[in-house]
Amino acid sequence: MQDGSFAILPEKESNFENKNYKRIGALLSYTFEKNSLEITGENGYLSLLFYRDDIVRIIMNPNTFPSRQTSLAVVMEPDQLNIIITENKDEILLKSNKLSIKINKQPLLLSISDDNGRVIVEDAPNGMASNKQKEVICFKKMEADDHFYGFGEKTSFLDKRGEKMTMWNTDIYAPHNPEIDALYQSIPYFLTIRQGKAHGIFLDNTSKTVFDMKTSNEDYFFKADTGQLDYYVFAGPKPKDVLEQYTAITGKMPLPPKWALGYHQSRYSYKNEQEVRELVQNFKDRDIPLDAIYLDIHYMDGYRVFTFDEDRFPNPRQLVQDLKEEGIHVVPIVDPGVKEDPEYFVYQEGIRNNQFCKYLDGQVYHGDVWPGNSAFPDFTSEKIRKWWGENHNFYTDLGIEGIWNDMNEPSVFNETKTMDVKVMHENDGDPKTHRELHNIYGMLMGKATYEGLKQNLNGNRPFLLTRAGYAGVQRYATVWTGDNRSFWEHLQMALPMCMNLGMSGIPFCGPDVGGFAHDSNGQLLTRWTQFGTFTPYFRNHCELNSVHQEPWSFGEEYENIIKKYIQERYVWLPYIYTLFQEASILGVPVMRPLVMEYPNDENTLNLSDQFMIGSDLLIAPILTPDTYHRVVYLPKGNWINYWTNEELKGGKHHLVEAAIDILPIFVKKGSIITQGTVKSSTEAKERKLTVHVYPEEEKPSIFRYYEDDGQSFAYENGDYFECVFKASLKERSLDITVDVEHSQYQPEWEEIEILIHGVDSDMNNILNGKIQDGIEHVTDETTRIIIASQNIFTVNN
Ligand code: MIG
């Protein structure tokens, strides 16, 4: 029925009147205390609560005084702040050091400005409203030049102006196309760019939510199916500030183990031990680096989680150990559905201890998934999360350090694709329906799993991959974008999807390289792997019925190029790892849209087919078949073609060449990047750090380099290495300094090679204040300086 014209009957039009919304009305009374204001309105109650000078939380509850309870997305408590309040006949004014809120009394409407008096978030005439169906909604004014980013995992282009998006974690196998608006993740958060400045809004509501940036040009709205209208406003003003503010509320990604950043190989499924061993042998024989292999659902005994099938995998301990010796980790899949089988210990435990989701009358909910009829752990209870987490010692005892969570929307094989929304969750003593908590279920499975792994791994960093999530999921898991297809269109879509995940506080993400469903081919896999070299998460994965897409599957010509780009990943790791560390502290993404770095440049606002890694590296992959040229936009400044050292002027578009073995990469002139060497896996020793310097007259270059052991949490106690590389070019003299700022961890490399690009050989090169001997001119335009690593620590003196 949905496919016919029935879907567009006149009565189906949804607007303010049809939905019987009631505006909050006039302010009746209020009370103020230190950092918060409580307002009683005609048709609802309102709280304004400052968390920091630059973060305010606003809660509207139609029925009672707002609860200050948050979802488990929120990790921050409000700071002690002094907010100034003033009042006149028509308005109340609240002021922190960074934000001021004007509260109009009749009707009750809010207008929020930053410390420069710039209005950032302002209620539209409909303001806040609710209806009898328990919906809560909020309308905000939209400016002609507002552009919207974030919203987690969404299809289509980068800028979400003109889109209406639903948040309801859904397992969509097909199709992923521009009109599918609810996928596996729900991140009810967005960042607005308005005239080059940024601000953000996070709606903390775990039921179904909708963001409409499409229907009207004067205003946009966000609404929730049920619960409070509970949102946070972030002041900006730079895009990176908004990310820092949002992740102050929802938390930051912990530093992943280095092996999680290497190349990963997966297939649904490598079905038995022999197949896995042959796969590893193939990588060895062909000298292709590899850090992890995934075990999809076939490893289990009848799809029972926490088991291995004895025929297919007779000795998982040996397998895991042998692979570890080769520097390869094994990552098994774990789904939430627990098979209904009275002779299966997990099902027994769950039933005996009341750990599965139940209806109000106590009946356990069962749904059909891979193992057949199954029950679902109630991850909203801390006790139950602990049980689930501890069960993972089954894997960690075998030497496993990474887990893959799938189907955790939760996905159920039925009409609604998920659990009955009437099922209850314990929610640590505050029981709620699945309708109210649906969107956070998958993330809480992640929390249970990550915390369980961490406890079992004796100080090693766990790795968790998840399909479903909610705001804050970055604290526990890496996100992959689910069941894409081996289409060029899906390669194209992966760029804005990952950029917007990054803008949503999730730096560690990536698509299935090569495409999951449908058949890949040599050219597509080659171009996709080139892109994968720079996606934060780099895994090749495909489905049961599709052709094999391991790096060698399409002949030698493609294999060689694919191999080269997997190797490049390892070469770039010392740069990427530093960016991961930055992301773990500041919340900014590793892979970012150009608009994050150049928000005033209108060419970047919806630029969806190129991206940046950090602030200085621009990647412009080839995204269409039989294509050996493309247009690249370079923002203002000068840029260097990484492969040819050719210099290009920014502030304009260029046509660049890209033969099948070329991924176009551009380095900003005036920057410094660090690289390592080709390795078989991240376990192998890094012998040399290469520092590429691209000096720019009168513009000092600077790069803060970070390194640690890549596997433990010792960095939290200061066991890390940090140094700052600087270069300044003035009057035929290039001055380079290496300042070690922290060296409680000693890097493995034996030497640093400094490669200076684009200055002629008769230039004076000065290293840490001394004219350096032993300078070698590699070409007329590139100079090499080698420093033994023991001198790094003394070179300052
Ligand atoms: O409905 O475990 O997205 O990556 O290979 C299929 C089998 C279930 C969906 C995941 C996919 C995985 C597959 N899973």
Image: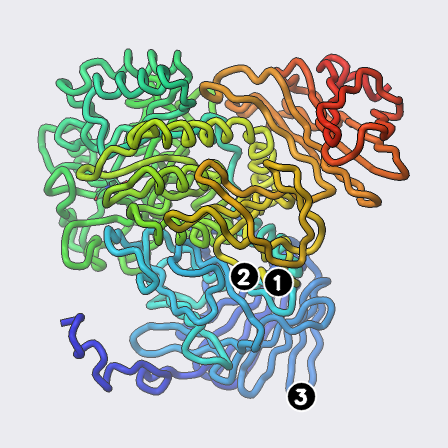
Three-letter code for the amino acid on which mark 3 is drawn: Lys
The answer to whether mark 1 and mark 2 are in CB contact below 8 A is: yes
Three-letter code for the amino acid on which mark 1 is drawn: Ala
Report x, y in % for residue 702: 74, 38
* Residue closest to the eye, 30 or 708: 708
Tell me the number on the disc at residue 89: 3
Does residue 291 appear anywhere in the picture? yes
Three-letter code for the amino acid on which mark 2 is drawn: Leu
Q: Residues within 10 Å of mark 3 (few under 14, many from 20)?
A: few
**Residue indicated by mark 1:** 198
The reply, left or right, for residue 352 in relation to residue 333 is left
Mark 2 CB near ligand 1 (8 Å cut): no
Res 266 → quadrant: top left
* Residue closest to the eye, 784 or 683: 784
In the rendered image, the quadrant that contains the N terminus is bottom left
| CA–CA distance in space, label 1 to label 2 | 7 Å
